[in-house]
Amino acid sequence: MQKDCTFALRFKNTFFDMPKMKTHSSAKKRFTVTGKGKVKRNRARMRHLMRKKTTKAKRHLRSGVVVDRSEHARIERLLAI
């Protein structure tokens, strides 16, 4: 009984934000956050049918791109930032 009382006293003034926000599992695999807080994603059309794409097109698809500001809030909510 003594332990429960000290636990209650120790955490009496602490604010707990419950339940914890969980990160959306598919979002954390698809997006990364840059150092300045922007959200970065990979480009589409890179999975198959690569023979018909030019080398220049494939090279441009390799680079990531910053997500548009209109989608930024939605993705931050998925990533629980």
Image (spheres, rainbow, N blue to C red):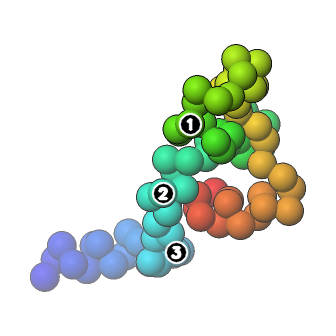
Circles 1 and 2, Cβ within 8 Å, touching? The answer is no
Q: Badge 2: how crowded within 10 Å, few (<14), some, or many (20+)?
A: few
Residue position for label 3: 17
SS assignment at label 1: loop
At a point 78% along the width and 61% down the height, the residue shown is: 71
First-in-chain label (1 vs 2): 2
Q: Which residue is mark 2?
A: 26
Residue 80, given in percent of the width and then of the height, sits at: 58, 61
Question: Which one is in front in this view, the residue at disc 1 or the one at disc 2?
Answer: 1
Q: Residue furthest front?
A: 52
Q: Amino acid at mark 1?
A: Leu
Q: Residue at x 18, y 73 (%)?
A: 3
Seen in the picture, residue 70 relative to 30 is either above or below; the reply is below
The circle drawn on residue 49 is: 1
What residue is drawn where x is 72% and y is 22%?
54
Question: Nearest the camera: 80 or 39?
Answer: 39
Question: Which x, y percent locates residue 6?
Answer: 28, 73
How many residues crowd around disc 1 within 10 Å: few (fewer than 14), some, or many (20 or more)? few
Query: Residue 46's quadrant in the figure?
Result: top right
Discs 1/3, front: 1
Q: Is residue 58 left or right of residue 80?
A: right
Type of residue at label 3?
Asp
Q: Looking at the image, tell me whether mark 1 or mark 3 is earlier in sequence order.
A: 3
Q: Position of residue 67 (x, y in %)?
A: 78, 48
Q: Residues under labels 1 and 2: Cα distance?
A: 24 Å
Q: Which mark is residue 63?
A: none
In this rendered view, identify the residue nearer to me: 25 or 19: 25
* Residue 3 vs residue 18, the one in the foreground: 18
Q: Quadrant of residue 42?
A: top right
Q: CA distance from mark 2 to mark 3?
A: 24 Å
Q: Secondary structure at mark 2?
A: helix
Mark 3 neighbour density, 10 Å: few (under 14) some (14–19) many (20 or more): few
